[in-house]
Image: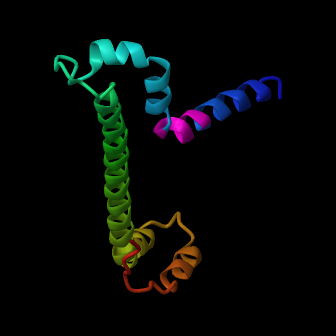
Amino acid sequence: MKYAKFYATIMLAVMLVNIGKHHLPYIEYNLFRNYIVANLCIQRTQADNCCQGKCYLEKQINRVNEADESTAASQMETKQVKCEIFDYIKTNIYSLIQILFVKAEQSQFVNLYLVRIFIDIPVPPPQRFI
């Protein structure tokens, strides 16, 4: 309880940065506009440059969007792998229980009544949850 406010403050700060990450390029552009126009603008060498650093802003926005897309893609891959593992376990659970039952029958130290209860559990057919 002593550190609850500290952890709550840290969590709030992380959440605010995560929520506001799409606004950070705009804030950066407005704070450092003169530096961006003079040094980071892609079209700064052109004589009639009317970009005023917006090309750099667009590049930063695209970078944030690409990071979001890659994160979403990796989350989908993780979800798909979890579904495949779950499906494999669901389809093979009955055979695994039968193997355990055979091993339990060979061993006299296991209560066979409990093993027989688990054998009677119906296993539904595999389904895809995506």
- Where residue 91 sits, quadrant-wise, is bottom left
Q: Nearer the viewer, residue 1 or 49?
A: 49
The image shows residue 96 at horizontal and vertical percentages of 37, 71
Between residue 33 and residue 63, name the one nearer to us.
33
Q: Give the residue drawn at x 16%, y 20%.
A: 46
- Any part of residue 37 in sight: yes
Q: How is the image coloured?
A: rainbow
The reply to whether residue 99 is visible in this rendering is no
Q: Residue at x 29, y 29 (%)?
A: 51
Task: Give the percent coordinates (x, y) of residue 72.
Answer: 37, 52
**Where does the magenta region start and end?**
16-22
Query: Which quarter of the picture shows residue 124?
Result: bottom left
Q: Choose between 62 and 101: the one closer to the eye.
A: 62
Give the side of residue 67 with respect to residue 2, left or right: left
Residue at the front extreme of this rendering: 48
Q: Is residue 104 left or right of residue 67?
A: right
Residue farthest left in this picture = 46
Prevailing secondary structure of the magenta residues: helix
Left/right of residue 113 with respect to residue 73 in the rendered view: right
Up-down: is 3 above or below 14?
above
- Per the image, is 71 magenta? no
Seen as rendered, the residue at the extreme right is 1
| Residue 86, x across and y down, in percent | 39, 67
Q: Is residue 12 above or below residue 90?
A: above
Which quarter of the rendered picture does the N terminus lie within?
top right
Q: Is residue 13 left or right of residue 74?
A: right
| Residue at x-position 71% and y-position 28% | 9
Answer whether residue 20 is magenta in the image: yes
Camera-side residue of 28 and 35:
35
Q: Say which residue appears at 17% left-offset and 16% top-offset.
A: 45
Residue 123 pos. (x, y %): 45, 84
